[in-house]
Structures are given as C-alpha cells and as structure tokens.
Amino acid sequence: LESFHLRMLEKFSSKSARVKGLAFHPIRPWLCVSLHNGSIQLWDYRVGTLIDRFEEHDGPVRGVDFHTKESLIASGGDDYKIKVWDYKLRRCLFTLLGHLDYIRTVQFHPSHPWILSASDDQTIRMWNWQVRTCMSVLTGHNHYVMCANFHPKEDLIVSASLDQTVRVWDTSGLVKKHSMENSSLGLGLDDPMRPPGGGLNMQAELFGTNDVIVKYVLEGHDRGVNWASFHPTLPLLVSAADDRHVKLWRMSETKAWEVDTMRGHTNNVSCVMFHPRVELVVSNSEDRSIRVWDMSKRVGVQTFRRENDRFWILAAHKTQNLLAAGHDSGMIVFKLERERPAMELHEEGDKLYFVKGRELCVYDFQKGREQPIANLRRPGQFAQTDGIGNSPRYLTYNSFNPTEGNVLVCSDIDGGTYELVTFASNGSNSGNLQEGKRGTCVGPGVFVARNRFAILDKSRNIVIKNLQNETTKKVLPPTPVVDMLFNGGTAGRLLLRCEDKLVLFEQQSRRVLGEVTAPKVKAVSWSSSGLCAILCRDGVIIADRNMEQLCSISETVRVKSGAWDASGNIFIYTTTNHVKYCLANGDTGIIRTLEQPIYVTKVHKKQMFCLDREGKVKVIAIDTTEAIFKLALENKRYGQVMEMVRHSRLCGKAIVAYLQAKGFPEVALHFVREPKTRFNLALACGNIEVAMETAFLLEQEEGDSSCWHDLGVEALKQGNHQVVEMAYQRTKDFDRLSFLYLITGDTEKLRKMLKISEMRGDTMGRYHNALFLGDAAERVKVLEASGNTNLAYVCAKVHGLDEDAERIKAALEEAEKEVPEVDGTYTLLQPPTPINRAQNWPLLEVKKHTLENLNGVGDGDYTNVENDDFSGRGDDHAGDDGVGQSTSWGEDDIDLGDENDDNDDFGDGDGGWGDDDLDLGDDMPAPSGSPAKTDEDMNQGGDFFSPPSAGTSRTAAWISNSSHVADHTAAGSVDTAMQLLNRQIAASNFDAIKDKFVQSHLSSTYKVTGMPFTPPLKIHPTRKPGLPAATFTLDMGLNTLKSAYAFFKSGKFSESAAAFTSLLHMVPFIVAETREEASQVKELLENAREYITAIRIKAAMAEAAADPARSTELSAYFTHCNLQPAHLLLALRSAMGTAFKHKNFIAAASFSRRLLELPDVSSAKNADLKAKAGKVLQKSEAQARNEHELNYDEAKGFKIDAFKLSPIYRGDDLIECSFCGSTYSVDYKGKLCVTCNVSTVGSKTLGLVTGV
C-alpha cells in the first residue's frame, strides 16, 4: 500500500482468495473472514494464527457475523443458505432456507435473537435463530439488496440496493410483538400470517409482513448503492454507490435528507462506515484504495492504495481502534494512529510526564494525583484531523536540569516536529508555550546536558540546541543511515538507531563507544545499575552501559513497553497480552496476562504503574517473587534464597526444571512434595537419606521398585555400601550383591549367597560365589555337576585336591575321554583382601551447603522478600572509603553472565575462585611465639578439611569470554557453537561446515613431547589473554578470494564455485579484531554470495541452451550479479552475444550499451570487443524488437531469486537467508538456502557475530 508504512499501522495481514465478508469478535482478538472460494476462516489477529476453518457452503460466502454473547457465527453465501455455526463445537448447528438468490450480508441483532439477511432476490429477511424460522420478509426494493444493517441502539434497519435507493425500516412493531410472544415458541399462536406448522405462510412470503415498515426512502445516488450504515450515536447515515460517491445523510423523527457528498474515488465504492471512536468516515473501493474522510469538514484526509488488489469489504471493531479491509488477495487489520501515549518518567521516579489529548500532564506517584501543566498547540502548518496519527508520539524530560522542568514533545506531522515546553520544576505554573520554541526533527529529541538537547534534522545530521532553541553545534553522525536518537544513559551520550543496530555515540568527542545489533528498535530504558533494556518490535535486548549485549529475548507478539524495577536488576515489560520479566542473564518468565495492551511507567515493589490507551494512570498488582528468587540465586545470595523458600509459594515444574538446570536441586528439594520428582531431586543433590525415604514411599504407595536401582548407583558413588546392599536386595540383583560382599570382605554373607545360588539352581552364580570365597573344592563340585569334567579335573589338580583329581580322572578314563595334561607352572588364585571392613568407605568430608539446610541460615544472612529494593551486584552495605571496608563500584557493575563470579567488582581476577565472602581472620599469620595450626591439629580439634572450588579451565574461559563461534569450537564445545550459529544465522545444516569445525578445534592445541614416560604437554596458543588463537584469519579469506577470482576469470567455474563455497563457510569462523576488519569480513560474505549465484546462473545457461527465451533471461540475470568490473565485462559480452544470437535485439542493445559504458572496454586490449559491441548496438537499434517474451525488465529494480533464478521486482514480497543474504520468494520460507547450504531461509535472527 502506498503510504501504508507512513500512517496506516498494519497489525496483521493474510493472503487468501478474494475476501467478501469480515467480522470482528466483540471480546476476543478474532476475525472471521469469508472467502470467494466458499471457505470461512477464523483468525487470531493478535498472534497471527489461523484458529479454524469452516467449509460447507457451496460457492462464495459474501456475509459473516459474530454473535455478541454466544459462541455463534452466521454466514450467508451464493448457495442461498444461511448457516449458523458454533465455533466452540467447530460445526454447523443448522441452516436457514428461504432466500431465492445470492445472500449478500448477514448480521446478528445486538440484543434480540434475530438474524438479518439481504439477498439478490430483492428481499430482506429477519430470522429468529432460536426457533430457526423466518419472522419477517421486507419487500420494497426492486433490484439486488446489497446490504442490510441493524441500528446499534434503536429499532431501525438500513438497507442499500442497486435500485439506487437507501431505505430505513422501522422495526418497533416487530419488537413489541416479539416481547408479547411466548418465549418457548417464539411467535404468537393466533398470528393470522403464520401457518400451524410454524414459519410464514405463502402470502407473507410473497408480499411481506406489516411488522416492519419503511420509514425513509433516500434517493440521491445516480447508480446502484453498495453499502449503507448507521452512525453509532448520532442520527446520521452514510452510503456508498457505483456512482463513485460517498453520501452523508441526516435523520429526524419525520424525515431524512442529504447533508453532503464526498467525492474522490475513481471506481465503484464497495463499502463505507463510520469510525467507531472518532469523527471519521472510512470507505474502500474497486479503485484499489481506502479513503478516510473528515466527517465534520466532509473532505478526504488520507488515501491508502494497493497496487493490484481491489477492496470489497470493511469491518470495524466495536470497542477498539481497529479496522479490517478485504481485497482480492486477502485482508489486512490496521488502525489509523498509534495509541501509545507519549510519556516519560522523571529520573527520581516520583513523577510521570505524559500527553493527554492536547495537554501536557504530570502524575505525582506519592500524592496519586494528576495535574495538567501546559496546553499544546496542534503540530503542523494546517488544521489537523483527530484520529489519523496527529497525536504527539514522543516525550522527553530533561533529567539533567534540577532548577526547572523542560520537556520535548515530538510528533510525526509534516515529516517530524518538536515543541519545547518549559515550566517550574514543581509543575505549579500553567505552562503557556513561548513563541519560537518549536522546530522540525526526525524522531524524538534527546536532552544531552542541563541546557542542551539534540535532534536529528531532515538531512540526518545531529543538531545540538540550547533551551532558547538556538543551534549551537552540528555533528555529522558516524554512519549516514541514522533515523532516530535515543538517550545514551549519561550526559553527552546518544544512542543512534541505524539499520538494524544501535550505536553509542559521544557527541563531544565524536567517538563511537560501542554498538549492538538490534532490529526495529522502539525504545530504550536505562536502569539505576547501568543496564540498558532495548525494546525491539519482536523482542528485548539487555546490554551494559557500553552496549555489550548480555542477553536477548525473542517474542512471538509485539513488545509494547517496559521499565526497570527499583533495584535496577529486573526488567518488567509488556507485550500485547502479557506482563513479563527479564534478567540480565537471560532468564525470563510470565508475571500475568492482560486483557488489553498497557504501557508500563514504573515498577515499585508489588505494584506496576501504567498508562492505558486513553491516558489513564492505572495501578496493577504484580508478583515478582519468581524473578527475585532467580536473581538471588544468580547472585549467590543464599540467605535470601532460603528465606524465600520458607515463606514464598514457589512451585511448578518450570521452577523445578530451572533449579536443576542451574545446578541447585537442593533448593527445589525443600518445597517439592511429589514423590517421584522429590526422589530425582534427592539423587541430583546426593541426599541419600531423602532419596531412601522417598523410595520406600514410592514402593508402598505406587508399587514402583525401579527407583532402588538408581538409589544404589548414587549410594555406590558415595561409598555408602549399606544402602547399596539394601538396594540390591530390594531389586534382587544377586550378582552385584555378591560382588559387593567381595569388595567389602563380608565372607559370611558371601557364603549365604552361595547357598542361595545353589537353591536357585544358578550354576554361574554358584561358581562366582565359590570363586569369590576362594573355595576350590566347591568350584570343583560346580564344574563336575555342570558336566565340565575336564575343567573340574584341572581345577582339582591345580589346587592340590588329589583325591578329587584321581576320582575325576578315573571317571574320564572309564568314559574313554581324554584326560587333560596339567604342567607344574601354575599360581594359586585367591580373592583379594578388602582394604577396609568398616561400615562405610571413608570419604573426604565437605561442609554441607547452606542451601541443603534451612535451619543453617542465620538471621542476618538474608534479605526480606517483601523488600524488592535490593542490589544484586556487590555489597549493599559498603561503607566509606576507609580501610577494611568494601567499596562499591556502581559505575562498573558489568554482569558478564559468568556463573563462577560471585562479585562482579572482582570479575577481572578472582571470578573463577568461588565465594568472595572469606573469613579473613583465619588467613592472618599466627602471633609470634605460637606455631600455626596444621591440618592434623585442625582434624584433632574436630574441624575437617574443606577443599577449594575447582578453578575455571582455559577452554571454559574461552567459552565464557566470547560469543564467537570460532572460540567455542576451539574449546571443543561444539554444542554451544552450533547453538550460537543457530541463534545468529539460523544455521541448521552443520554437515556443510563440519570440516571447519574440526580444523578450528584441532588448530587450537599443540602437543610437545616431554620427559620419557610422561604425557606430552598441551599448549594453547592465544591471540589475547583469555581467548584462543584464530584458526581462520582475514588474510586467509582474502587469499581464498583471490584464487576464486582467478578460477572464475579463467572459466574454471567448478573450481571457482568450490573456492567461493569454502570462503563462505570460512566466514563464520573468522574473528575480526577491529571495525574495519568486520566490514571486510562482511564484504567477503557478499562477494562469495554474488559469485556463487553467478556461477549457478552460468550452469543453468548451459542447461537451457535449447530454450532461447530462458537462456537469454539467464544471461541477463548473470549481468546483474555484483561482479568485479573485469568479470562484469565478460558477463555482458556473453549476454550480448546470447541475446543477439536469439534475435532479442532490445536486450542485446541494452547489454551493448552497458558494455560500452564500462571503463575497461576503452583499453587497447579490448579494442576489438568495443568495435563488436558498437556494431551489435547499431544493428539491434535498427531491428528494435525481441523475438521472445522475456521475464526481464531492466527499468525495474530487482533481486534474483536464488532458488528459481528469476527476478523479484521491487515491491514484491521477499525473504532472505539470515547468513549469506540470498533472496527468495516467500513460498521458500523454512527451507535450506541453496547458496550457503547452511542456514534456514526466512528466520529472523540478530545476524552473524564477526568480533568478540
């Protein structure tokens, strides 16, 4: 649509067959759509999903409507049928028959059980859907009745017909009659117009009934009338007709007359209606446009067009500012202006400044009172119309000026304007605007100092002005595509939105301090702890003060607003239907649902202050316990965690899974009561006592004995062989039980196991137990009884059992079997001697974690849950800069997401060494004269050794210090590397880059041979401290590019394609150290993509050699790949020859002109080519025609569909590969990119990370 992105705010769109009917659900975010192909679709326009489809009509469905209270849908179609559907049951309840031609519209009455239908049989019918009969037939029109609508409040009906009239019908008689009828039958039994069996008699069917009478007949249109509708509150009508006019009518008690005619449409006007909330009229037409009219001035104020689709129907939501329009290829849901009020919170958090209507207001949170400050004049040079995007869009408060209040109010009118309002800091003055305090800008203005503010002018330059609105400086932005300014967090800093990223810019020194990838940024919010929340259209990004990204959260619905809580560590944001929270480590969750969108202004403890779309301040209760709990756990505030476990209602599978994933199953163990989950948690944290207790409970209540095996495995790890013995006994695992008795030296129980195996007839178990006991005689008996006489003889002979050996030997000789020979070189096999025969194996005792014992937390170790104003970073009670007191570096609290860091103030050196809360008294040197305590002394004193926490390995540090895939691969963490690639570039086919993974990992470690009998030394080369050396460098990429160019120029396209593909797959693994290197890496990616596409086109040209049209088209597309000038010359030469050969002279002339314009063609070596191109141009211009119709228009800008190898012209919908940027038509979404063979096409991602 033309102007669609400027003013009309499209909320949802769908593509389908021609849409003929639309209806909004009165409460739910649903839209019912009837199509020309006979289908009815039910859409959720808020999340953009198709809920259901109803398909029973035979032919187009032209009318559809929702019931206001019941779960009913009415539809009418060209099969002369009215069907009533129950969308909960998902089926048709019944069909109403009576119309003799196409049914144009159907509508439920807002209060009575009636359905109104208009038909091409020149009648209007009223049906009682409860008794499923026709109540009345309205006759009078002498041509097709195109629509009929109930008045929303009065007993009136309006109808429009192709007989060029609009009729208003009075239904008060029918209402009175209906109120007196029997509610069970629906109609009076003595009605002479009704036959005994129900329904209307023949006379009523032919001539109508007298219950509904014509009140007015409005004549004024010159051709057939397509639509008419009532004003919701005023006595007005509006009609649209084939004479291309929209007429406004007024009614009184006795007559109706034409007020005015609105002209502007250039074809039949299909539909028209009053806007439900503002004084506007909206119409659409077959001239492919939607027009908005000012009802009071009767002039058009906005026009929106589609390029190819005619509009047929309009619908308006009864309570929300939403409209829907149906056209030839689908429908759109839109609104005419943004409803988010312009607002900003005072930095101290006690006042909210916002625009309400035409007033600048302030809300005092302490007093709970709203007060107007200033009257705002309408922006723009001309008188504006309410309801079409003229409200102020941005408001910025000057937090740097403590002496007075300064507010910038910005609007999008006339390309962007601003007004500077100055008032007393207490807001007591009336705030009359001073002359000259206004100007033009793009987007919002930002205060950068006490008496300075910055705006973006129409030339995209940053202009610094003082409070007298005088320009003091102009600054050229670091990138030319800046389209919006945001607050930079501190004085003198700005955030610049350019393309899909935010750039942190210091305007005094004109330096770029940092940047972060953030698509479609709407707003930013700074916390008191220095964190920045970036609100995008479809997600939230948390970054530090230097724009280093900490986490990113994606949403399926649009993000509306957000604010930090009082601690500055929990970000509360709202979407279309939820209130959610987000932490800097990426944890997120839902706080509550919303019925209507709201805009958060302030979060204080368990209250959320917000503005609705009418500018009313609301206070909503929220529960952020889960967010505070996760934050306390992340910051290792274990006292607070235990206090919350005691007093908070934490439950649910999500929180249990979260605790297990974070490595804190012992916390969940305190509040989980479900036996199976509790058993798994006990095993996860190694609590054998709780696991055993739960195992008994599971066995008694559920008969589940499988848990004993898991318990035995865990107990064996801890050396608790008593529990292991019980677990094996419960599971009757005799083999493991015998081996347990062997290693614990319990010979008595081993002998019992021997008897048990003998009773069970378990020959193998009996032999094993005899072997474990060292009982050779028993082993001989087992072997002899099992028929292994030879082995029995050997065993007896070896162990000196001569009597048994002789007896067995005689038996073998008697049976004429060979007696085995036994030499004298044998050794007696005895069972090993147990090292320890104690109750359980001794282990190194470690102090129990605080989280395992609720009673182990002292009173001073926690913060009250009710107090949300805590800081999750560092010590809240740090004193002054005295000796021995900890100092809080509030300006440098950067949360790098490292779970090993306890205190970010020491993250540079001590982050990997566990807890910072050390008892320094134990580390002090012993006083002179008294020896220091040794470990033996401590053990004798009752203390025990607690081992230090394991440090962070070098490879683990690489992973935590970098978000680049090359560093993760070098560390051997392929899983996280694949996750990074999937998030950044939607990579799905990792087989294509498997060799790069392997090469990157193998190159990260060198092994050096050491001393004899010692393992080799591992050496990890680094490019900087904490990061591995890069396997793939920019120089390697450039060398690969040069070789690929050489192959391409020499015509070795297979080798060239392989080289460019290798380069493309190398790009994600190249680490760029500077911004210039990052730009070069992106250039490598673009060059590889263009040349791979060009080579694929070249191969397709060879396959299509027999098709003159296709081969000419492909040669044309070949010239539109972004090639080097020398290569473009070759491409144009080939295309010129192909087009001329196939007599496509217009195309040949175009190629020859482009060839002659190249600088290289003027060189001496290309003289023959230049002459040849001149001759081709001369002959082609003489012929001036194409032999074949080509899908190629050089005048239109286009991109090449990488799959179809066909053009996608400017304005057509397209999608791109998130990695290489190859373009495709929208039907290719979700498939693997054919250029890079790595990423999924059409996925929205943040993009490739080229630097750390």
Image: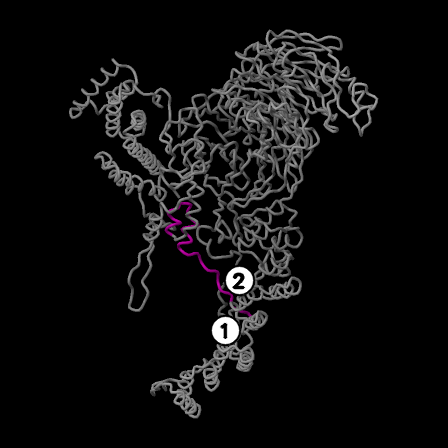
Q: Which residue is mark 2?
A: 921
Give the answer, above or below, for where 1190 lies relative to 604. Answer: above
| Residue type, mark 1 in image | Glu
Q: Position of residue 8 (x, y in %)?
A: 54, 22
How many marks overall? Answer: 2
Residue at point 73%, 8% (across, down): 255
Q: CA distance from mark 2 to mark 1?
A: 20 Å
Viewer can see residue 1147: yes
Q: Position of residue 265 (x, y in %)?
A: 54, 12
| Residue type, mark 2 in image | Gly
Residue at point 64%, 25% (across, down): 81
Give the answer, above or below, for where 1031 lies relative to 686. Answer: above
Q: Position of residue 841 (x, y in %)?
A: 52, 73
Residue 1001 vs residue 404, the one in the foreground: 1001
Residue at point 46%, 60% (across, down): 950
Q: Secondary structure at mark 1?
A: helix
Q: Which residue is mark 1?
A: 936
- Point out the stretch of residues depicted in magenta: 943-970
Viewer can see residue 929: no
